[in-house]
Amino acid sequence: MSAQAPLTLSEAVQRALDHSPERRMATEDVAAARVAAQSARLPLLPTIGLDEAMTRGNDPVYVFGSLLRQERFTTANFVLNSLNRPLPLNNFATRFSGNWMAFDSFQTELGMRGADHQARAAAEIATRADQQLAWRVAEAYVGASLAVRNEQLTEEQTRTAEAMLDASRTRVEAGTAVAADELSASTALAARREEQIAAEGALGTAWAQLEQAIGAPIPDAERRLDVIAEKTDDLPSLADAVALALRTRKDRAALAEQLAAARTGVTAAHAAFGPTVAAFGSWEQDRGAFTGNSGNNWMAGVQVHLDLFPAARRQQLAASKIALTRTVAASESADNQIRMEVTRAWYAHRTASEQVQVARAAMSEAAESLRIFRDRYDAGLATMTDLLRVEDAERQAQNAYLQAVGGNALSWIDFQFAMGTLDPLQHALGVTVAQSASDRPTHVSSLQPTTLHEAKP
């Protein structure tokens, strides 16, 4: 039966997108903005209503008018006593009415335009939220993968220390080494075991952090991750990176839409001072009983309105101008922040890449030095203390290289996020799968069979 395939970064990000409450909230924000954009178009439609009313009374004016609308008025109703003191009368009225804003100085059109800008801004914010979620998952994924490799490395170093203790014990028994060599090797083994215990604890914490970033537990059967290797992508120039970020950052695009909406809001506030033209009409049927003969009438008209004392509109215009000024300042501040973030991420990744090269060279030199001292120890030309000192230097070089590789991957993720090019569902989010075991360089020695470049099966 084949082994469980590693949990890839793209799969981890997809799980996070499926479970993230923040993403659900952002999705609902986009839906709400789209509803608002649709609502802004409603004033273009006429309003049509149906009313059914029943009234009864003996008010002279009400009785006189109702009889006329019911088409039941006769000469007998002109009797003064009937006019002054009429009998109570029922009136059942069915009324259709409608209103339509024919012209409002383009306020509706401007409101629609502003609502569309806000809807697009919400969509850009949601996309940036997806990138931020992918960024958190990618960093947790890299951390967990490094913790896995660090735990493997400490296990390998523990086995090496055990081999060194066995070798020193054999030499002491053969009389070719002193007892102090065995004690030194035993002390080194205890230190390696402490490091292994600490690495196991750090691995458990790293898995918990990855589960938190994903928003769901990871079953034990799926707890295999891709190996983090050196990130070798070419680094663009800082100027190109900043320019790209200013073009592609979704939060900046959202601010651009909000700025356009604010400018539209000022134009709409000016338009509110203009006149409005509304058309209205109604048709009514009046009856003395719920069913039976009835009279009907209709009425239609056009109304032109101009506010001669628009104090409220002046306040609205002032508020719109303040909102525009604030949005312009926020946009300029965001541009400065983006430049700073990209610059910091660019230098951090360049530094991390250089540190990987230095750490790789140091690890190779330390490995060669350890090989030489092992040969010297085997030949009786070096003491266990000398060998342990060189072995410790080689171990520190391996650890430094592992941390440098992790820092390189994390800095690349940060750089992509700062530029706004982090694709939540693409595999290459800054994590590179290491070469196969047959393609990786190996370091063979009598005491340590595996090195940092060899993945544990």
Image (spheres, rainbow, N blue to C red):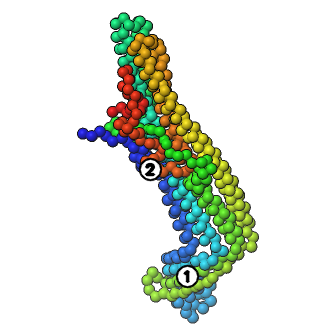
Numbered tag placed on residue 258 in the rendering? none
Q: Position of residue 59 (x, y in %)?
A: 60, 80
**Secondary structure at numbered mark 1:** strand
- Report the residue at 48% width, 17% height from top: 389
Q: Position of residue 398 (x, y in %)?
A: 46, 28
Q: Are marks 2 and 1 in contact (CB under 8 Å)?
A: no
Residue 204, how many percent across, how many down? 42, 31
Q: Which is nearer the eye, 200 or 293?
A: 200
The residue closer to the viewer here, 449 or 302, is 449
- The residue wearing badge 1 is 282
Q: Reply above or below: 454 against 50.
A: above
Residue beneath disc 2:
426
Give amino acid for label 2: Gln
Identify the residue shown where x is 41% and y is 39%. 434
Q: Establish if 332 lies above or below 97.
A: above
- Disc 1 crowd, CA 10 A, few/some/many (<14, 14-19, 20+): some
At horizontal 59% and vertical 50% (from top left) the residue drawn is 241
